[in-house]
Every structure is written in C-alpha cells, then in structure tokens.
C-alpha cells in the first residue's frame, strides 16, 4: 500500500488538521493564562489532538510513509498530556508542559513537511 494516493491524501489532511489543532492549543493556553477563559477548552482540544495523532500513526503505518516519525509525534503528544495532568500537583513538572509544546509543534511541523514533500507515484511519473 506504499504511496497509495488515498492514504497519501489522508496523511496530508491529518497533518494539516494536526497543525491547526496545535495552533489552537497555543491560542487557548494564552487565553487561559490571561483569564479570558478557563483551561477547559485547552484540555478538550489536547485530548482531541491525542486522538488525531493516533489516527495519523495508523494512516502512516498503512501507507508505509513516515510511520517512525508519526510514532515520535504520538510519544511527545502523550507526554504533553501527562505533563499537563501532573502539572496541577507538581508545578515544576507542569513547567515542562510549555516547553514540550514547542517539541510537539516541531515534530508535527516536520512530519507535515515530509507528508507534502514526498512525491506520489503520479507526481514522479509526470516529472520523468
């Protein structure tokens, strides 16, 4: 199933959704930090993000494209959830939640770049 066009398209769409959710997370964290809202929406979007990156891993495995990178994204995203949860009782652990958010953004961004940079069979044939 490597380079199956539907799986490649799904992988790209999920990568865009992932990046949009991460941007939303930064906005909601700022809104919560400055008292514009509670952190409830930030927590809900964070949980949804975990599900989306798990779906991204499944699609990457099926497509046989960037599965190791998708697995790393799952790992740092789950770590993000754990750091946020532990941070309520241990502020110094919670402080790493913000730092790890940058790692999540970087890993997701490079995965998105890879998803769009890798040519599909049709694109390779057109350039030959």
Image: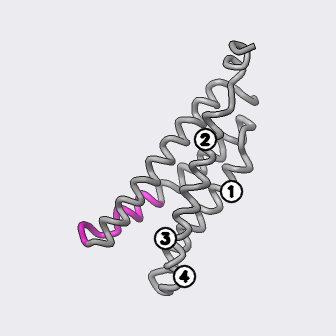
The quarter of the picture where residue 10 lies is: top right
Query: Which numbered circle lies on residue 72?
Result: 1
Residue 70 horizontal/vertical position (percent): 66, 49
Q: Tell me what residue is drawn at x 63 percent, y 57 percent.
A: 74
Q: Secondary structure at mark 1?
A: helix
* Picture quarter with the N terminus: top right
Residue positioned 42% across, 53% down in the render: 23
Relative to residue 53, is residue 28 drawn left or right?
A: left
Instruction: Estimate the spatial distance between the alpha carbons at disc 3 and disc 4, rounded to whole Å.
Output: 10 Å
Q: Is residue 89 magenta?
A: no
Circle 2 SS class: helix
Residue behind mark 3: 98
Task: Give whichever of discs 4 and 1 has the lower sequence position.
Answer: 1
Mark 3 vs 4, N-terminal side: 4
Q: Are marks 3 and 2 in contact (CB under 8 Å)?
A: no
Q: Residues within 10 Å of mark 3 (few under 14, many from 20)?
A: some
Q: Which mark is residue 117?
A: none
Asked if marks 3 and 1 touch (Cβ < 8 Å), the reply is: no
Per the rendered image, the range of residues in magenta is: 35-46
| 112 is higher (above) or lower (below) than 89 | above
Disc 3 to disc 1, C-alpha distance = 18 Å
Estimate the x, y position of residue 75 in percent, counting from the top left.
Answer: 65, 61
Q: Judging from the image, what secondary structure is the residue with disc 4 in?
A: helix
Q: Residues within 10 Å of mark 2 (few under 14, many from 20)?
A: some
Please give the residue where the numbered disc 4 appears in the rendered image: 93
Task: Check disc 2 and report the residue beneath it.
Answer: 113
Q: Earlier in the sequence, mark 3 or mark 2?
A: 3
N-terminal label among 3 and 1: 1
**Mark 1 or 2: the one toward you:** 2
């Amino acid at each position: 199933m490597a380079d199956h066009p539907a799986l490649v398209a799904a992988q790209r769409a999920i990568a865009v959704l992932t990046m949009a959710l991460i941007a939303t997370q930064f906005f909601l964290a700022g809104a919560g930090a400055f008292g514009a809202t509670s952190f409830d929406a930030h927590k809900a979007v964070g949980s949804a993000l975990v599900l989306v990156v798990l779906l991204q891993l499944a699609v990457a495995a099926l497509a046989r494209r960037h599965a190791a990178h998708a697995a790393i994204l799952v790992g740092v995203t789950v770590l993000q959830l754990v750091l946020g949860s532990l941070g309520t009782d241990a502020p110094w652990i919670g402080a790493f939640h913000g730092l790890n958010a940058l790692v999540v953004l970087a890993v997701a961004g490079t995965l998105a770049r890879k998803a769009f940079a890798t040519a599909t069979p049709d694109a390779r044939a057109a350039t030959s």
